[in-house]
Image (cartoon, coloured by chain):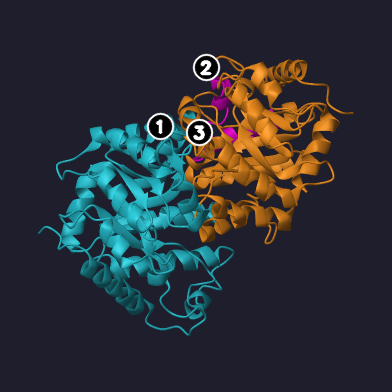
Chain colours: A orange, B cyan
Amino acid sequence: MFADVLIDRIKACGSPCIVGLDPNPALVPAGFLEQFRDEGEEWETTALAEYNRLVIDAVHDLVPAVKLQSAYYEVFGVAGAALLADSIGYARRKGLLVILDAKRGDIDSTSEAYARAYLHRDPPRPHRADCMTLNPYLGRDSLQPFVDACAESGAGVFVCVLNSNPGAIELQTRDLEGVPLYEAIAEIVRDLGTSLVGKSGYSSVGAVVGATTGESAAHVRGLLPRSIFLVPGIGAQGGDLATIAACFNEDGLGAIVSGSRSIMYPSVPGSPAGDHRASVREAMVRAAASVRSAIPKPTA
Amino acid sequence: MFADVLIDRIKACGSPCIVGLDPNPALVPAGFLEQFRDEGEEWETTALAEYNRLVIDAVHDLVPAVKLQSAYYEVFGVAGAALLADSIGYARRKGLLVILDAKRGDIDSTSEAYARAYLHRDPPRPHRADCMTLNPYLGRDSLQPFVDACAESGAGVFVCVLNSNPGAIELQTRDLEGVPLYEAIAEIVRDLGTSLVGKSGYSSVGAVVGATTGESAAHVRGLLPRSIFLVPGIGAQGGDLATIAACFNEDGLGAIVSGSRSIMYPSVPGSPAGDHRASVREAMVRAAASVRSAIPKPTA
């Protein structure tokens, strides 16, 4: 099951940090992009697929998983769907877990369709992920089909509980019948996750908790002791280390921390072609060291 | 701009009812599907594209718009993205507005990417819609990039305010600092929509309001006099006519009512090949008549 495999991989690579694969032609080094100009109509997504592979090659032994933000693939329509499948397949062949950051959630029959699209193993689909992110605004029964899919396929989900952007913090910390709104969502996450707790003690129903949320992050940690947190926020989102540390349990586990732009595009945009793989690896090593310094030593 | 064009089209065809295009091989008449078995690897999505075209042909003069539920396309990966683009293009060529029911919403840079994917006109993309649905759980700044895109491109959005499924009603009607949660979202929708009110008096920032939400629908109507409501709920979702009526203003306008399975698949699944186009048209005519009987006569 997802939670157990993820915890094993975190222990094996000695780091809870993951890289976000957000393909963006405006941020890929210009020299790298240029090499693909002659490769036909889809040269741009061909270049982005190769850059994603470069990033995966650079960090595959350092990270337990990669996170693909669906929006950056959807921009390219059909070619973007092919890019998504290519990067998912490549990451999996490199031994990485694949998290699709799609924040889906809808009425039951539609959530079932999304779960079929991304979590079910049968029939095999090249865009299947090991885990996806969900949005809880449509309530408990909008999340249930995904949890059912996890039970069947061994996949996982991260439900948005407390996000990193100012508008989310403003809304999600408002008082809902005596508790913050995020606590009401956390209660749903806890209930849904109970049946999917693995040998590791962690559930395959996790939570998205932003690294900018200060003391509220520690509050969510207390509410959801068995959920793994997906913590976006190294770099561009401005997360702070104290909040990141609060997302972990005392066993040094319980969270994965994601960085996208700061790791994937460490060079200045437009800089000349160089050893991008080494730069990406160095950015990942630094981010991981910085996070490791803040959290309890992971259980061996 | 979207709101004005939509109101014009509603008046022109004399109906606020739209059809949801949710391609589902399990519901397409078996005889229709069978015709495509020999059409190569992608025969299933080829068949679904043709069935969507059949539905569009059947109703194009009866409806102002079609709504495509993204999940039912994403299931098919690359072929699904091609199916989405085909159906969007065909609907537009038939003079219909295209609403993508995707319920997106994320941190600002990601919402910008989704808005680029589906709302911006430049560069032209075959999967561009005229309007998309949004999920507000990440707060005001997660919606702003879509509103900005609407201002630039003349597109529209419908933000989930009060959805039709039981879990949504349970969560969204809970008390948030003295008002139902949906009212707090409605306030954000009203603020965001102020700058996009057109000559029709309606804003291109609309709201999703379920047809199963009873008196709460009337409450939202009062909160958002200038927003058009997207009301899913004819047929399978069990909407009732009194609630649908409450989603309209006294001018007989202000809402579009969507039916998917009940209109698209009026026959019993597995039934023999027949005149599906006539059956779909009849289902649409009946649904429209039933809705029209419940609402104030539209302004001519």
Relative to B235, residue A56 above or below: above
Residue B237 in view here: yes
- Of labels 1 and 3, the one closer to you: 3
The quarter holding residue A162 reads top right
Q: In percent of the image, x 76 and y 31: which residue is there? A: A60
Task: Please give left or right for residue A163 compared with residue B185 in the image.
Answer: right
Q: CA distance from mark 1 to mark 3?
A: 11 Å
Q: Amino acid at mark 3?
A: Gln
Q: Amino acid at mark 2?
A: Gly
Q: Position of residue A86 (x, y in %)?
A: 64, 43
- Of labels 1 and 2, the one closer to you: 1
The quarter holding residue A278 reads top right
The quarter holding residue A84 reads top right
Q: Secondary structure at mark 1?
A: helix
Task: Please give left or right for residue B28 compared with residue B201 in the image.
Answer: right
Residue A172 tag number = 3
Q: Secondary structure at mark 2?
A: loop
Let me know if residue B54 is in the magenta part: no
Q: Please, which chain is the residue tagged with disc 1 on?
A: B
Q: Please, which chain is the residue tagged with disc 3 on?
A: A
- Of labels 3 and 2, the one closer to you: 3
